[in-house]
């Protein structure tokens, strides 16, 4: 962890190791594990400034992940050690922007990520403005600290994507909010990509989290090629209550 700006550390670095439970059949770090490590690093960063989940909840604040993007320069491999650094970059309107960088044992960047959060009151569900939060907790914006991943914008998903399958939300998919955990959505992209992942390596993804999915609900997952990009695919997940997520991923062919 680097030195503090005011009462809050400007960034947090967490060591990691790709365990057997993290790797897919190609021994690559699963996209859901990327998000899990990011979630853990972000929570540890906040806790270092006396902003753990429980502390924020008691003060009427909860972070809700709305969008994320990741650029993967090369996959982390089973058994590999890495360092994950995260920091708050800036706020734009009601958006709270956090960055992440995965670095391998040689000091080379292997993946970059940008996430956008909203802050809400957990009791009223009213969206809160980040400016007051930054001032109250002495958080300094670092807009110059950019990464290679693009900011996750609104995805343009065409109507009429063919249905690739149905995913039922099970108890083990849910978290303390009783909803499908955000990290699971990343694996849905590789689970339902047209043509499968055999002979392919994931090089990036973007996900928009639009509505919670609850235990027992069926998610109809629609997927198809993105005509605007080579080796790119688009996704939309729909429950009986509406669209719960949209996504895009890119792959490199290794066949």
Image (spheres, rainbow, N blue to C red):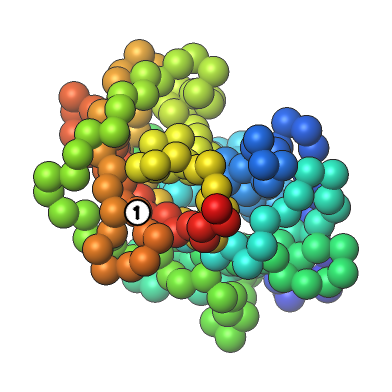
The extreme left residue here reads 159
Q: Nearer the viewer, residue 149 or 10?
A: 149
Would you say residue 245 is visible in this rendering? yes
- The picture places residue 137, in percent across and down from the top left corner, at 61, 63
Q: Quadrant of residue 110?
A: bottom right
Q: State how many labels appear.
A: 1
Q: Residues within 10 Å of mark 1 (few under 14, many from 20)?
A: many
In the current view of this chain or complex, which residue is farthest to the bottom?
A: 144
- Would you place residue 83 above or below residue 214 in this image? below
At x 25%, y 38%, the residue is 222
Residue named by callout 1: 233
Residue 65 in the image, given as x and y percentages of width and height: 45, 49
| Location of residue 161 in the rendering, given as x and y in whole percent from the top left corner | 18, 44
Looking at the image, residue 245 sits to the left or right of residue 183; the answer is left
Q: Nearer the viewer, residue 57 or 201?
A: 201
- 88 left or right of 251 in image: right
User: 225 and 135: which one is in front?
Assistant: 225
Residue at (27, 48) in percent of width and height: 224
Q: Is residue 164 above or below residue 85?
A: above
**Residue 43 visible in rendering:** no
Residue at the image point whose x is 42% and y is 27% from the top = 179
Q: Quadrant of residue 18?
A: top right
- The image shows residue 3 at horizontal and vertical percentages of 83, 73
Looking at the image, is 27 positioned above or below residue 254? above
> Which quadrant, please, contains the N terminus?
bottom right
Q: Secondary structure at mark 1?
A: strand
What residue is at 21 percent from the left and 54 percent from the top? 157
């Amino acid at each position: 962890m680097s030195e503090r700006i005011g009462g809050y550390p400007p960034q947090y670095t967490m060591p990691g190791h790709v365990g057997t439970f993290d790797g897919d059949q190609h021994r690559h770090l699963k996209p859901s594990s990327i998000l899990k490590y990011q979630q853990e690093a972000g929570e540890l960063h906040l806790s270092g400034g006396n902003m753990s989940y429980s502390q924020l909840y008691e003060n009427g604040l909860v972070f809700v992940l709305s969008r994320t993007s990741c650029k993967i320069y090369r996959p982390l491999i089973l058994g590999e050690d890495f360092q994950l650094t995260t920091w708050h970059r800036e706020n734009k309107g009601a958006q709270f922007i956090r960055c992440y960088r995965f670095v391998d044992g040689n000091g080379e960047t292997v993946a970059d990520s940008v996430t956008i959060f909203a802050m809400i009151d957990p009791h009223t569900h009213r969206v809160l403005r980040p400016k007051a939060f930054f001032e109250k907790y002495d958080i300094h914006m670092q807009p110059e600290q950019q990464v290679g991943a693009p900011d996750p914008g609104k995805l343009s998903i065409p109507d009429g994507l063919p249905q690739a399958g149905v995913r039922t939300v099970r108890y083990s998919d849910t978290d303390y909010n009783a909803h499908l955990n955000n990290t699971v959505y990343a694996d849905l992209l590789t689970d339902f990509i047209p043509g499968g992942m055999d002979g392919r390596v994931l090089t990036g993804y973007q996900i928009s989290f639009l509505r919670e999915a609850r235990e027992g609900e069926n998610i109809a997952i629609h997927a198809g090629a993105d005509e605007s990009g080579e080796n790119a695919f688009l996704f939309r997940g729909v429950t009986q209550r509406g669209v719960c997520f949209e996504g895009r991923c890119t792959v490199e062919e290794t066949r």
